[in-house]
Amino acid sequence: MVTPSLVEDPTGPRWTPARIVVVILVVAMVGMWGYVLYLAIGPGRQPPPDRLSDPAFATAAQTRCEAAHGVVDQLPTANEAADATAQAAIVDDANAAFDAMLRDLAAIVPPGEEGDLATAWLADWRTYLGDRTRYADALRVDPEARLLVTPKDQDQITEFIDAFAADNRMIACATPLDVG
């Protein structure tokens, strides 16, 4: 009686077509992920399209935005307001600080294409500031009013403001979180 051996026959095929296909698929997936990582974090990574090549505006903007937030941080929070009218007054005071910030930033916009990017970002900020003003006005009429943000390219305009701020390392210039 012959007992079956657990050892494969050395003369039999070691590379079956199925094994070859699996190895090719594994190598292809590893290669694909290597390429993705190369593009994401390696030397193949492209800078964001709205990154300013001269960081002077971004540096000055970060400082000015921090100052505006310093003013807003001194204001009472919305939940400290006695009523919706008082809350609207707090939003108005914060809006005044942000309006002054935008005027100061408009005065230092760089020339050329980078200036066009910064000007478009400031225009988005102005739109958002208008949304905040409408919100404060609505609070005076309806205590249950909500901040409605203008859409842009099927997204909220705040997404564009925040992306430009992040791409240029101006985190303090992102949309504020003082109302909601």
Image (cartoon, rainbow, N blue to C red):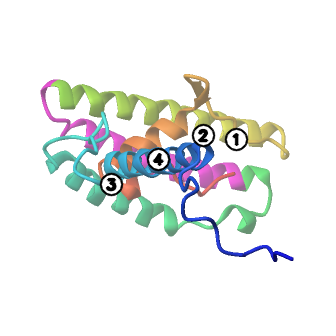
Q: Tell me if 95 is positioned left or right of 58 in this view.
A: right
- Check residue 110 for magenta coloring: yes
The residue carrying mark 2 is 132
Q: Tell me if 69 is positioned left or right of 113 in this view.
A: right
User: Of label 4 and label 3, which has the lower sequence position?
Assistant: 3
Magenta: main secondary structure:
helix
Dot 2 alpha-carbon crowd within 10 angstroms: few under 14, some 14 to 19, many 20 or more: many
Q: Position of residue 1 (x, y in %)?
A: 87, 77
Distance Cα–Cα, label 2 vs label 4: 11 Å
Between label 1 and label 4, give the one nearer the viewer.
Answer: 1
The residue carrying mark 1 is 147
User: Of label 1 and label 4, which has the lower sequence position?
Assistant: 4
Name which residue type carries label 4: Ala
Distance Cα–Cα, label 2 vs label 1: 7 Å
Name which residue type carries label 1: Leu
Segment colored magenta: 87-112
Distance Cα–Cα, label 1 vs label 4: 17 Å
Distance Cα–Cα, label 3 vs label 1: 37 Å
The residue carrying mark 3 is 41
- Check residue 89 for magenta coloring: yes
Between label 4 and label 3, give the one nearer the viewer.
Answer: 3
Contact? badges 2 and 1 (CB < 8 Å): yes
The residue carrying mark 4 is 96
Between label 2 and label 4, give the one nearer the viewer.
Answer: 2
Q: Position of residue 48 (x, y in %)?
A: 31, 40
Circle 1 sits in a helix, a strand or a loop, which is it? loop
Residue, x 68% and y 48% (percent of image)?
Answer: 88
